[in-house]
Amino acid sequence: MTAGSGRSSVTVTDNRTGKTIEVPIADNAIPATAFLALKAPYAPGEREENDTPYGLRVLDPSFMNTAMIQSAITYIDGNKGFLMHRGYPIEQLAEKSTFLETAYLLIYGELPSAKQYGLWQWEIMHHTFVADDLAKMLKNMRYDAHPMSIFISAFAAMAAFAPEANPALQGRDMYVQNKDVMNKQIVRILGKATTIAAMAYRLRIGRPFNAPRADLSYTENLLYMMDHMAEPNAYRPDPRLAKALDVLFILHADHEMNCSTSTMVHVGSSLVDPYSCVAAASAALYGPLHGGANEAVIRMLTKIGAVENVPAFLEAVKAKKELLFGFGHRVYRETDPRSKIIRQVADMVFDVCGREQLIEVAIALKDAALRDEYFTSRKLYPNVDYWSGLIYKAMGFPLDFYPVLFVVPRVAGYLAHWKQQLDSGKNKISRPRQVYVGPPRRDYVPLDQRPDRAVSSASGLVDLPHYMSKRRLHKI
Ligand SMILES: CC(C)(COP(=O)(O)OP(=O)(O)OC[C@H]1O[C@@H](n2cnc3c(N)ncnc32)[C@H](O)[C@@H]1OP(=O)(O)O)[C@@H](O)C(=O)NCCC(=O)NCCS
Protein backbone atom coordinates (compact mmCIF):
# COMPACT_ATOMS: atom_id res chain seq x y z
CA MET A 1 0.00 0.00 0.00
CA THR A 2 1.12 3.54 -0.66
CA ALA A 3 0.07 6.94 0.55
CA GLY A 4 -3.01 8.10 -1.34
CA SER A 5 -6.29 6.25 -1.55
CA GLY A 6 -4.77 3.15 0.00
CA ARG A 7 -6.37 1.05 -2.71
CA SER A 8 -4.23 -1.61 -4.37
CA SER A 9 -5.02 -0.63 -7.91
CA VAL A 10 -4.07 1.76 -10.66
CA THR A 11 -6.53 4.15 -12.25
CA VAL A 12 -6.08 4.71 -15.95
CA THR A 13 -7.84 7.37 -17.97
CA ASP A 14 -8.05 6.98 -21.72
CA ASN A 15 -7.60 10.53 -22.99
CA ARG A 16 -9.14 9.58 -26.32
CA THR A 17 -12.54 8.99 -24.74
CA GLY A 18 -12.28 10.20 -21.14
CA LYS A 19 -13.08 6.68 -19.94
CA THR A 20 -11.44 5.69 -16.66
CA ILE A 21 -10.81 2.16 -15.48
CA GLU A 22 -9.51 0.91 -12.17
CA VAL A 23 -7.14 -2.00 -12.61
CA PRO A 24 -6.46 -4.22 -9.59
CA ILE A 25 -2.86 -4.78 -8.51
CA ALA A 26 -2.08 -8.28 -7.20
CA ASP A 27 1.49 -9.19 -6.21
CA ASN A 28 2.59 -5.88 -7.74
CA ALA A 29 1.27 -6.84 -11.17
CA ILE A 30 -1.68 -5.78 -13.26
CA PRO A 31 -3.54 -7.95 -15.77
CA ALA A 32 -2.83 -6.81 -19.33
CA THR A 33 -6.33 -7.91 -20.40
CA ALA A 34 -7.84 -5.10 -18.27
CA PHE A 35 -6.77 -2.66 -20.99
CA LEU A 36 -9.10 -4.30 -23.49
CA ALA A 37 -11.87 -2.33 -21.78
CA LEU A 38 -10.35 0.87 -23.23
CA LYS A 39 -12.06 0.96 -26.62
CA ALA A 40 -12.19 4.03 -28.83
CA PRO A 41 -13.53 4.94 -32.27
CA TYR A 42 -10.96 5.23 -35.03
CA ALA A 43 -9.34 8.68 -35.12
CA PRO A 44 -9.66 10.47 -38.50
CA GLY A 45 -7.23 8.80 -40.94
CA GLU A 46 -6.24 6.07 -38.47
CA ARG A 47 -5.32 2.67 -39.87
CA GLU A 48 -8.06 0.09 -39.65
CA GLU A 49 -5.45 -2.49 -38.68
CA ASN A 50 -5.03 -0.78 -35.30
CA ASP A 51 -8.25 -2.52 -34.19
CA THR A 52 -8.92 0.51 -31.99
CA PRO A 53 -12.61 -0.24 -31.26
CA TYR A 54 -11.67 -3.69 -29.97
CA GLY A 55 -9.61 -2.48 -27.01
CA LEU A 56 -6.17 -1.10 -26.15
CA ARG A 57 -3.21 -3.41 -26.72
CA VAL A 58 -0.06 -3.72 -24.64
CA LEU A 59 3.11 -3.69 -26.75
CA ASP A 60 6.16 -5.23 -25.10
CA PRO A 61 8.74 -6.44 -27.66
CA SER A 62 11.27 -8.85 -26.14
CA PHE A 63 9.16 -9.02 -22.95
CA MET A 64 10.90 -6.13 -21.21
CA ASN A 65 8.20 -5.91 -18.52
CA THR A 66 5.72 -8.68 -19.09
CA ALA A 67 5.26 -11.49 -16.58
CA MET A 68 4.31 -14.63 -18.51
CA ILE A 69 3.29 -16.80 -15.56
CA GLN A 70 2.73 -16.87 -11.81
CA SER A 71 5.41 -19.18 -10.47
CA ALA A 72 6.40 -20.73 -7.14
CA ILE A 73 9.72 -22.09 -8.37
CA THR A 74 12.50 -19.49 -8.60
CA TYR A 75 12.93 -15.89 -7.49
CA ILE A 76 15.60 -13.45 -8.67
CA ASP A 77 16.21 -10.05 -7.10
CA GLY A 78 18.19 -8.57 -9.96
CA ASN A 79 18.99 -5.36 -8.10
CA LYS A 80 20.54 -7.14 -5.15
CA GLY A 81 22.05 -10.03 -7.12
CA PHE A 82 20.01 -12.64 -5.21
CA LEU A 83 18.65 -15.99 -6.46
CA MET A 84 16.59 -18.61 -4.64
CA HIS A 85 14.81 -21.81 -5.60
CA ARG A 86 11.61 -22.64 -3.70
CA GLY A 87 12.85 -20.23 -1.01
CA TYR A 88 16.36 -21.70 -0.62
CA PRO A 89 19.24 -19.29 -1.50
CA ILE A 90 21.42 -20.57 -4.34
CA GLU A 91 24.54 -20.24 -2.14
CA GLN A 92 23.12 -22.79 0.35
CA LEU A 93 22.08 -25.19 -2.38
CA ALA A 94 25.49 -24.96 -4.09
CA GLU A 95 27.27 -25.66 -0.81
CA LYS A 96 25.01 -28.30 0.72
CA SER A 97 22.81 -29.90 -1.92
CA THR A 98 23.41 -32.08 -4.96
CA PHE A 99 22.14 -31.52 -8.48
CA LEU A 100 19.59 -34.33 -8.31
CA GLU A 101 18.29 -33.13 -4.95
CA THR A 102 17.98 -29.58 -6.31
CA ALA A 103 16.19 -30.97 -9.38
CA TYR A 104 13.70 -32.70 -7.06
CA LEU A 105 13.23 -29.47 -5.12
CA LEU A 106 12.59 -27.51 -8.31
CA ILE A 107 10.17 -30.04 -9.76
CA TYR A 108 8.25 -31.14 -6.65
CA GLY A 109 8.51 -28.04 -4.47
CA GLU A 110 10.22 -29.45 -1.34
CA LEU A 111 13.53 -31.03 -0.46
CA PRO A 112 13.05 -34.82 -0.59
CA SER A 113 13.11 -37.03 2.51
CA ALA A 114 15.96 -39.54 2.63
CA LYS A 115 13.65 -42.25 1.27
CA GLN A 116 12.30 -40.03 -1.52
CA TYR A 117 15.81 -38.96 -2.46
CA GLY A 118 17.01 -42.56 -2.69
CA LEU A 119 14.10 -43.54 -4.92
CA TRP A 120 14.50 -40.44 -7.07
CA GLN A 121 18.18 -41.12 -7.71
CA TRP A 122 17.49 -44.80 -8.39
CA GLU A 123 14.74 -44.02 -10.89
CA ILE A 124 16.76 -41.43 -12.78
CA MET A 125 19.91 -43.55 -12.90
CA HIS A 126 17.81 -46.50 -14.16
CA HIS A 127 16.29 -44.46 -16.98
CA THR A 128 19.55 -43.49 -18.63
CA PHE A 129 19.52 -45.94 -21.54
CA VAL A 130 18.23 -44.68 -24.87
CA ALA A 131 16.56 -46.79 -27.55
CA ASP A 132 19.08 -48.56 -29.74
CA ASP A 133 17.41 -47.22 -32.88
CA LEU A 134 17.84 -43.70 -31.56
CA ALA A 135 21.54 -44.38 -30.99
CA LYS A 136 21.78 -45.66 -34.59
CA MET A 137 20.08 -42.53 -35.82
CA LEU A 138 22.53 -40.32 -33.95
CA LYS A 139 25.45 -42.28 -35.39
CA ASN A 140 24.36 -41.02 -38.80
CA MET A 141 24.99 -37.42 -37.84
CA ARG A 142 28.11 -35.77 -39.24
CA TYR A 143 31.15 -36.10 -36.97
CA ASP A 144 31.57 -32.30 -36.96
CA ALA A 145 27.92 -31.47 -36.17
CA HIS A 146 27.50 -29.02 -33.31
CA PRO A 147 26.69 -31.16 -30.24
CA MET A 148 23.70 -28.93 -29.49
CA SER A 149 22.24 -29.84 -32.90
CA ILE A 150 22.62 -33.47 -31.91
CA PHE A 151 21.07 -32.86 -28.48
CA ILE A 152 18.08 -31.03 -29.97
CA SER A 153 17.59 -33.64 -32.69
CA ALA A 154 17.82 -36.49 -30.19
CA PHE A 155 15.10 -35.01 -28.00
CA ALA A 156 12.87 -34.27 -30.98
CA ALA A 157 13.36 -37.87 -32.15
CA MET A 158 12.79 -39.29 -28.68
CA ALA A 159 9.15 -38.25 -28.93
CA ALA A 160 8.86 -40.75 -31.78
CA PHE A 161 10.22 -43.47 -29.49
CA ALA A 162 7.62 -42.80 -26.79
CA PRO A 163 4.14 -42.91 -28.37
CA GLU A 164 2.70 -43.74 -24.95
CA ALA A 165 3.86 -40.29 -23.82
CA ASN A 166 2.30 -38.40 -26.70
CA PRO A 167 -0.90 -36.45 -25.96
CA ALA A 168 -1.63 -36.36 -29.70
CA LEU A 169 -2.02 -40.15 -29.52
CA GLN A 170 -3.08 -40.75 -25.92
CA GLY A 171 -5.38 -37.83 -25.26
CA ARG A 172 -4.95 -34.13 -24.80
CA ASP A 173 -5.19 -34.14 -20.99
CA MET A 174 -3.08 -37.21 -20.32
CA TYR A 175 -0.58 -35.27 -18.16
CA VAL A 176 -3.30 -33.48 -16.24
CA GLN A 177 -5.11 -36.72 -15.49
CA ASN A 178 -2.26 -39.16 -14.99
CA LYS A 179 0.58 -38.01 -12.75
CA ASP A 180 2.32 -41.40 -12.97
CA VAL A 181 2.87 -40.92 -16.71
CA MET A 182 4.08 -37.39 -16.04
CA ASN A 183 6.53 -38.53 -13.35
CA LYS A 184 7.81 -41.29 -15.58
CA GLN A 185 8.63 -38.85 -18.39
CA ILE A 186 10.38 -36.58 -15.86
CA VAL A 187 12.80 -39.31 -14.71
CA ARG A 188 13.29 -40.54 -18.27
CA ILE A 189 14.13 -37.09 -19.59
CA LEU A 190 16.54 -36.33 -16.73
CA GLY A 191 18.13 -39.77 -17.06
CA LYS A 192 18.56 -39.64 -20.83
CA ALA A 193 19.81 -36.03 -21.00
CA THR A 194 23.31 -37.07 -19.84
CA THR A 195 23.38 -40.08 -22.17
CA ILE A 196 22.52 -37.92 -25.19
CA ALA A 197 25.12 -35.36 -24.12
CA ALA A 198 27.81 -38.05 -23.85
CA MET A 199 26.78 -39.51 -27.21
CA ALA A 200 27.13 -36.09 -28.86
CA TYR A 201 30.68 -35.94 -27.48
CA ARG A 202 31.64 -39.49 -28.47
CA LEU A 203 30.41 -38.92 -32.03
CA ARG A 204 32.75 -35.96 -32.23
CA ILE A 205 35.79 -37.98 -31.19
CA GLY A 206 34.79 -40.96 -33.34
CA ARG A 207 34.52 -43.41 -30.44
CA PRO A 208 31.74 -45.92 -29.69
CA PHE A 209 29.11 -44.99 -27.13
CA ASN A 210 29.56 -46.15 -23.54
CA ALA A 211 26.55 -47.66 -21.81
CA PRO A 212 25.46 -45.64 -18.77
CA ARG A 213 26.21 -46.89 -15.25
CA ALA A 214 23.59 -46.75 -12.54
CA ASP A 215 26.10 -47.22 -9.71
CA LEU A 216 27.66 -43.78 -10.33
CA SER A 217 26.36 -40.34 -9.41
CA TYR A 218 24.65 -38.23 -12.08
CA THR A 219 27.74 -36.22 -13.05
CA GLU A 220 30.13 -39.15 -12.51
CA ASN A 221 28.08 -41.16 -14.96
CA LEU A 222 28.19 -38.33 -17.51
CA LEU A 223 31.99 -38.12 -17.23
CA TYR A 224 32.22 -41.90 -17.36
CA MET A 225 30.14 -42.14 -20.55
CA MET A 226 32.25 -39.41 -22.14
CA ASP A 227 35.68 -40.62 -21.12
CA HIS A 228 35.74 -44.38 -20.54
CA MET A 229 38.09 -45.98 -23.06
CA ALA A 230 39.85 -49.30 -22.58
CA GLU A 231 40.44 -49.30 -18.82
CA PRO A 232 40.15 -52.92 -17.65
CA ASN A 233 38.57 -52.03 -14.30
CA ALA A 234 35.92 -49.62 -15.53
CA TYR A 235 37.20 -46.07 -15.49
CA ARG A 236 36.14 -43.90 -12.53
CA PRO A 237 36.11 -40.14 -13.07
CA ASP A 238 38.00 -37.92 -10.60
CA PRO A 239 35.52 -37.32 -7.73
CA ARG A 240 36.67 -33.68 -7.43
CA LEU A 241 35.73 -33.01 -11.06
CA ALA A 242 32.43 -34.85 -10.68
CA LYS A 243 31.73 -32.68 -7.62
CA ALA A 244 32.71 -29.47 -9.46
CA LEU A 245 30.39 -30.40 -12.34
CA ASP A 246 27.62 -31.19 -9.86
CA VAL A 247 27.93 -27.69 -8.35
CA LEU A 248 27.89 -26.17 -11.85
CA PHE A 249 24.77 -28.20 -12.59
CA ILE A 250 23.07 -26.83 -9.45
CA LEU A 251 23.93 -23.29 -10.57
CA HIS A 252 22.47 -23.88 -14.02
CA ALA A 253 19.38 -25.86 -13.00
CA ASP A 254 16.86 -23.04 -13.26
CA HIS A 255 16.65 -19.30 -13.74
CA GLU A 256 12.93 -18.55 -14.03
CA MET A 257 11.63 -17.08 -17.32
CA ASN A 258 14.83 -17.02 -19.36
CA CYS A 259 14.54 -17.41 -23.13
CA SER A 260 14.65 -21.20 -23.15
CA THR A 261 12.45 -21.86 -20.10
CA SER A 262 9.83 -19.46 -21.38
CA THR A 263 10.02 -21.41 -24.66
CA MET A 264 9.34 -24.60 -22.67
CA VAL A 265 6.27 -22.98 -21.11
CA HIS A 266 5.15 -21.52 -24.42
CA VAL A 267 5.49 -24.75 -26.40
CA GLY A 268 4.18 -26.85 -23.49
CA SER A 269 1.03 -24.73 -23.40
CA SER A 270 -0.01 -26.34 -26.69
CA LEU A 271 0.01 -29.69 -24.79
CA VAL A 272 2.58 -31.24 -27.11
CA ASP A 273 4.69 -34.05 -25.59
CA PRO A 274 7.52 -33.07 -23.18
CA TYR A 275 10.31 -34.43 -25.45
CA SER A 276 9.32 -32.01 -28.20
CA CYS A 277 9.10 -29.24 -25.59
CA VAL A 278 12.66 -29.97 -24.37
CA ALA A 279 13.90 -29.96 -27.98
CA ALA A 280 12.32 -26.54 -28.56
CA ALA A 281 13.62 -25.11 -25.28
CA SER A 282 17.13 -26.45 -25.96
CA ALA A 283 17.08 -24.81 -29.38
CA ALA A 284 16.36 -21.49 -27.68
CA LEU A 285 19.23 -22.05 -25.25
CA TYR A 286 21.67 -22.75 -28.07
CA GLY A 287 21.83 -19.11 -29.27
CA PRO A 288 24.93 -16.96 -28.52
CA LEU A 289 22.85 -14.48 -26.50
CA HIS A 290 21.72 -17.25 -24.13
CA GLY A 291 23.40 -20.60 -23.46
CA GLY A 292 25.90 -20.14 -26.25
CA ALA A 293 27.45 -17.22 -24.36
CA ASN A 294 29.91 -19.38 -22.38
CA GLU A 295 31.32 -20.64 -25.67
CA ALA A 296 31.40 -17.07 -27.01
CA VAL A 297 33.32 -15.92 -23.90
CA ILE A 298 36.19 -18.30 -24.64
CA ARG A 299 36.26 -17.30 -28.31
CA MET A 300 36.37 -13.66 -27.16
CA LEU A 301 39.16 -14.26 -24.58
CA THR A 302 41.16 -16.26 -27.13
CA LYS A 303 40.81 -13.43 -29.63
CA ILE A 304 41.99 -10.88 -27.03
CA GLY A 305 44.87 -13.23 -26.30
CA ALA A 306 46.85 -11.21 -23.78
CA VAL A 307 46.26 -8.79 -20.91
CA GLU A 308 47.81 -5.87 -22.84
CA ASN A 309 45.12 -6.19 -25.52
CA VAL A 310 42.28 -5.69 -23.02
CA PRO A 311 42.03 -1.85 -23.29
CA ALA A 312 41.77 -1.94 -27.10
CA PHE A 313 39.08 -4.62 -26.90
CA LEU A 314 37.06 -2.60 -24.40
CA GLU A 315 37.27 0.43 -26.68
CA ALA A 316 35.84 -1.72 -29.50
CA VAL A 317 33.02 -2.83 -27.19
CA LYS A 318 32.23 0.76 -26.27
CA ALA A 319 32.22 1.67 -29.98
CA LYS A 320 29.62 -1.13 -30.41
CA LYS A 321 31.97 -3.07 -32.67
CA GLU A 322 32.27 -5.93 -30.17
CA LEU A 323 30.11 -7.44 -27.44
CA LEU A 324 31.57 -8.23 -24.03
CA PHE A 325 30.26 -11.76 -23.74
CA GLY A 326 29.58 -12.98 -20.21
CA PHE A 327 28.56 -9.48 -19.12
CA GLY A 328 25.09 -8.05 -18.78
CA HIS A 329 21.77 -9.65 -18.02
CA ARG A 330 18.15 -8.80 -18.62
CA VAL A 331 17.32 -9.19 -14.92
CA TYR A 332 20.55 -8.74 -12.93
CA ARG A 333 21.66 -5.17 -12.39
CA GLU A 334 24.26 -6.45 -9.95
CA THR A 335 26.80 -9.27 -10.12
CA ASP A 336 25.07 -12.56 -10.88
CA PRO A 337 25.34 -14.50 -7.58
CA ARG A 338 26.12 -17.67 -9.53
CA SER A 339 29.23 -16.07 -11.00
CA LYS A 340 30.65 -15.58 -7.46
CA ILE A 341 30.15 -19.27 -6.59
CA ILE A 342 31.49 -20.37 -9.93
CA ARG A 343 34.70 -18.45 -9.33
CA GLN A 344 35.38 -20.74 -6.35
CA VAL A 345 34.56 -23.84 -8.41
CA ALA A 346 37.12 -22.62 -10.94
CA ASP A 347 39.88 -22.78 -8.34
CA MET A 348 38.75 -26.30 -7.35
CA VAL A 349 39.04 -27.42 -10.98
CA PHE A 350 42.37 -25.63 -11.56
CA ASP A 351 43.81 -27.59 -8.59
CA VAL A 352 43.11 -30.81 -10.49
CA CYS A 353 43.56 -29.80 -14.13
CA GLY A 354 45.98 -26.90 -13.91
CA ARG A 355 45.33 -23.18 -14.12
CA GLU A 356 43.65 -22.08 -17.33
CA GLN A 357 45.92 -19.56 -19.09
CA LEU A 358 43.08 -17.33 -20.24
CA ILE A 359 42.10 -16.67 -16.62
CA GLU A 360 44.57 -13.78 -16.45
CA VAL A 361 42.95 -12.17 -19.48
CA ALA A 362 39.50 -12.82 -17.99
CA ILE A 363 40.41 -11.21 -14.65
CA ALA A 364 42.02 -8.18 -16.32
CA LEU A 365 39.02 -7.75 -18.63
CA LYS A 366 36.51 -8.02 -15.79
CA ASP A 367 38.44 -5.58 -13.56
CA ALA A 368 38.84 -3.05 -16.38
CA ALA A 369 35.15 -3.29 -17.31
CA LEU A 370 34.04 -2.84 -13.71
CA ARG A 371 36.14 0.35 -13.52
CA ASP A 372 34.68 1.72 -16.73
CA GLU A 373 31.75 4.13 -16.75
CA TYR A 374 30.27 2.51 -19.91
CA PHE A 375 29.64 -0.72 -18.04
CA THR A 376 28.85 0.65 -14.57
CA SER A 377 26.34 3.21 -15.87
CA ARG A 378 24.53 0.44 -17.78
CA LYS A 379 24.79 -1.86 -14.76
CA LEU A 380 26.62 -4.52 -16.77
CA TYR A 381 28.25 -7.07 -14.47
CA PRO A 382 29.67 -10.58 -15.00
CA ASN A 383 27.04 -13.25 -15.47
CA VAL A 384 27.31 -17.00 -14.96
CA ASP A 385 28.77 -17.58 -18.42
CA TYR A 386 31.77 -15.39 -17.78
CA TRP A 387 33.55 -18.02 -15.67
CA SER A 388 31.85 -21.27 -16.62
CA GLY A 389 33.60 -21.43 -20.01
CA LEU A 390 37.00 -21.15 -18.33
CA ILE A 391 36.17 -24.09 -16.08
CA TYR A 392 34.99 -26.19 -18.99
CA LYS A 393 38.11 -25.25 -20.93
CA ALA A 394 40.35 -26.19 -17.99
CA MET A 395 38.51 -29.54 -17.79
CA GLY A 396 39.29 -30.11 -21.45
CA PHE A 397 35.77 -30.06 -22.87
CA PRO A 398 35.61 -28.97 -26.52
CA LEU A 399 34.39 -25.43 -27.05
CA ASP A 400 31.13 -26.30 -28.72
CA PHE A 401 30.25 -28.72 -25.91
CA TYR A 402 29.82 -25.91 -23.35
CA PRO A 403 26.16 -25.17 -24.16
CA VAL A 404 25.45 -28.88 -23.70
CA LEU A 405 26.85 -28.64 -20.17
CA PHE A 406 24.42 -25.77 -19.63
CA VAL A 407 21.35 -27.40 -21.13
CA VAL A 408 21.64 -30.78 -19.36
CA PRO A 409 21.02 -29.30 -15.89
CA ARG A 410 18.60 -26.69 -17.25
CA VAL A 411 16.34 -29.57 -18.29
CA ALA A 412 15.43 -29.80 -14.56
CA GLY A 413 14.13 -26.22 -14.69
CA TYR A 414 12.27 -26.91 -17.93
CA LEU A 415 10.51 -29.88 -16.36
CA ALA A 416 9.67 -27.95 -13.18
CA HIS A 417 7.97 -25.25 -15.24
CA TRP A 418 6.26 -27.72 -17.56
CA LYS A 419 4.83 -29.59 -14.57
CA GLN A 420 3.81 -26.40 -12.77
CA GLN A 421 1.95 -25.19 -15.85
CA LEU A 422 0.03 -28.43 -16.35
CA ASP A 423 -0.65 -28.94 -12.62
CA SER A 424 -2.03 -25.41 -12.26
CA GLY A 425 -5.27 -26.39 -13.95
CA LYS A 426 -5.08 -22.98 -15.65
CA ASN A 427 -3.14 -23.87 -18.77
CA LYS A 428 -4.22 -21.90 -21.81
CA ILE A 429 -2.34 -21.87 -25.06
CA SER A 430 0.32 -19.11 -25.17
CA ARG A 431 -0.62 -16.84 -28.01
CA PRO A 432 0.87 -13.34 -27.92
CA ARG A 433 -0.72 -10.52 -29.86
CA GLN A 434 1.06 -8.23 -32.31
CA VAL A 435 0.75 -4.70 -33.59
CA TYR A 436 0.39 -4.91 -37.37
CA VAL A 437 2.35 -2.20 -39.19
CA GLY A 438 2.39 -3.75 -42.67
CA PRO A 439 0.55 -2.65 -45.84
CA PRO A 440 -3.20 -2.08 -45.64
CA ARG A 441 -5.56 -4.41 -47.48
CA ARG A 442 -4.82 -4.50 -51.24
CA ASP A 443 -5.77 -6.57 -54.27
CA TYR A 444 -3.64 -9.26 -55.87
CA VAL A 445 -1.77 -8.15 -59.05
CA PRO A 446 -1.18 -10.83 -61.72
CA LEU A 447 2.48 -11.46 -62.55
CA ASP A 448 2.37 -9.97 -66.06
CA GLN A 449 0.93 -6.70 -64.74
CA ARG A 450 3.57 -6.05 -62.08
CA PRO A 451 6.17 -3.34 -62.81
CA ASP A 452 9.87 -4.08 -62.58
CA ARG A 453 11.03 -2.80 -59.21
CA ALA A 454 14.43 -1.53 -58.21
CA VAL A 455 16.33 -4.12 -56.19
CA SER A 456 16.44 -3.19 -52.52
CA SER A 457 18.33 -5.23 -49.93
CA ALA A 458 16.80 -3.11 -47.15
CA SER A 459 13.32 -4.45 -47.85
CA GLY A 460 14.58 -7.94 -48.52
CA LEU A 461 13.46 -7.52 -52.14
CA VAL A 462 16.55 -8.74 -53.93
CA ASP A 463 17.52 -10.64 -57.06
CA LEU A 464 18.48 -13.95 -55.53
CA PRO A 465 21.98 -15.16 -56.41
CA HIS A 466 22.38 -18.60 -57.89
CA TYR A 467 22.95 -20.83 -54.87
CA MET A 468 24.07 -23.89 -56.81
CA SER A 469 27.53 -24.92 -57.84
CA LYS A 470 28.86 -22.88 -60.78
CA ARG A 471 29.34 -26.13 -62.67
CA ARG A 472 25.56 -26.38 -62.94
CA LEU A 473 25.03 -22.93 -64.44
CA HIS A 474 25.71 -24.28 -67.92
CA LYS A 475 22.54 -24.38 -70.01
CA ILE A 476 22.18 -26.97 -72.77
C1 LIG B 1 22.29 -10.68 -21.78
C2 LIG B 1 21.87 -9.61 -22.76
C3 LIG B 1 21.33 -10.31 -24.04
C4 LIG B 1 20.75 -8.77 -22.13
O1 LIG B 1 20.31 -7.89 -23.09
P1 LIG B 1 19.27 -6.72 -22.81
O2 LIG B 1 18.63 -6.90 -21.47
O3 LIG B 1 18.38 -6.67 -24.00
O4 LIG B 1 20.17 -5.44 -22.68
P2 LIG B 1 20.40 -4.38 -23.82
O5 LIG B 1 20.89 -5.06 -25.05
O6 LIG B 1 19.18 -3.53 -23.92
O7 LIG B 1 21.59 -3.53 -23.22
C5 LIG B 1 21.49 -2.26 -22.62
C6 LIG B 1 22.72 -1.46 -23.01
O8 LIG B 1 23.90 -2.15 -22.55
C7 LIG B 1 24.69 -2.53 -23.67
N1 LIG B 1 25.14 -3.91 -23.42
C8 LIG B 1 24.43 -4.92 -22.86
N2 LIG B 1 25.17 -6.02 -22.74
C9 LIG B 1 26.38 -5.69 -23.25
C10 LIG B 1 27.57 -6.43 -23.40
N3 LIG B 1 27.65 -7.69 -23.00
N4 LIG B 1 28.64 -5.81 -23.96
C11 LIG B 1 28.54 -4.52 -24.35
N5 LIG B 1 27.44 -3.78 -24.23
C12 LIG B 1 26.37 -4.36 -23.68
C13 LIG B 1 23.79 -2.46 -24.89
O9 LIG B 1 24.53 -2.23 -26.06
C14 LIG B 1 22.91 -1.31 -24.51
O10 LIG B 1 23.65 -0.14 -24.70
P3 LIG B 1 22.93 1.24 -25.17
O11 LIG B 1 22.09 1.66 -24.00
O12 LIG B 1 24.05 2.16 -25.47
O13 LIG B 1 22.11 0.89 -26.39
C15 LIG B 1 23.04 -8.67 -23.11
O14 LIG B 1 23.54 -8.09 -21.93
C16 LIG B 1 24.15 -9.41 -23.85
O15 LIG B 1 24.09 -9.52 -25.07
N6 LIG B 1 25.19 -9.93 -23.11
C17 LIG B 1 26.23 -10.69 -23.73
C18 LIG B 1 25.78 -12.12 -23.96
C19 LIG B 1 25.72 -12.91 -22.68
O16 LIG B 1 26.64 -12.89 -21.88
N7 LIG B 1 24.60 -13.62 -22.52
C20 LIG B 1 24.42 -14.50 -21.37
C21 LIG B 1 23.29 -14.06 -20.53
S1 LIG B 1 23.21 -15.06 -19.06
Image (cartoon, helix red, strand yellow):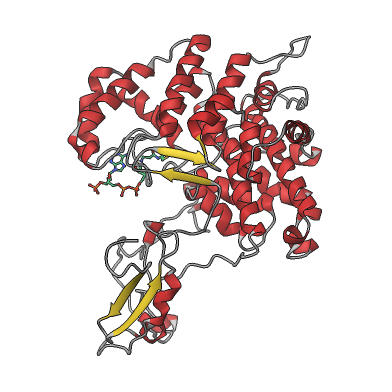
Q: Is residue 193 left or right of residue 473?
A: right
**Who's the residue at 42% across and 84% down the image?**
54
Residue 270 pos. (x, y %): 63, 63
Ligand 1, image quadrant it occupies: top left
- Screen quadrant of the N terminus: bottom left
* Res. 144 image quadrant: top right
The residue drawn where x is 53% and y is 35% is: 252
Viewer-proximal residue among 131 and 474: 131
Q: Is residue 22 visible?
A: yes
Q: Residue at x 39, y 85 (%)?
A: 442
**Residue 401 in sight:** no
At which x and y percent is residue 354? Answer: 47, 10
x and y percent of residue 240 in the render?
59, 15
- Residue that appears at 67% across and 49% down: 156
Residue 457 at x, y percent in the picture = 31, 60
Q: Quadrant of residue 367?
A: top left
Position of 370 relative to 158 (above/below): above
Q: Is residue 270 above or below residue 310?
A: below
Q: Is residue 265 left or right of residue 55?
A: right
**Number of marks in the image?**
0
**231 versus 186 height, above or below:** above
Tell me if 153 is positioned left or right of 332 in this view. right
Choose between 55 and 434: the one closer to the eye: 55
The part of the image, by quadrant, that contains residue 51 is: bottom left
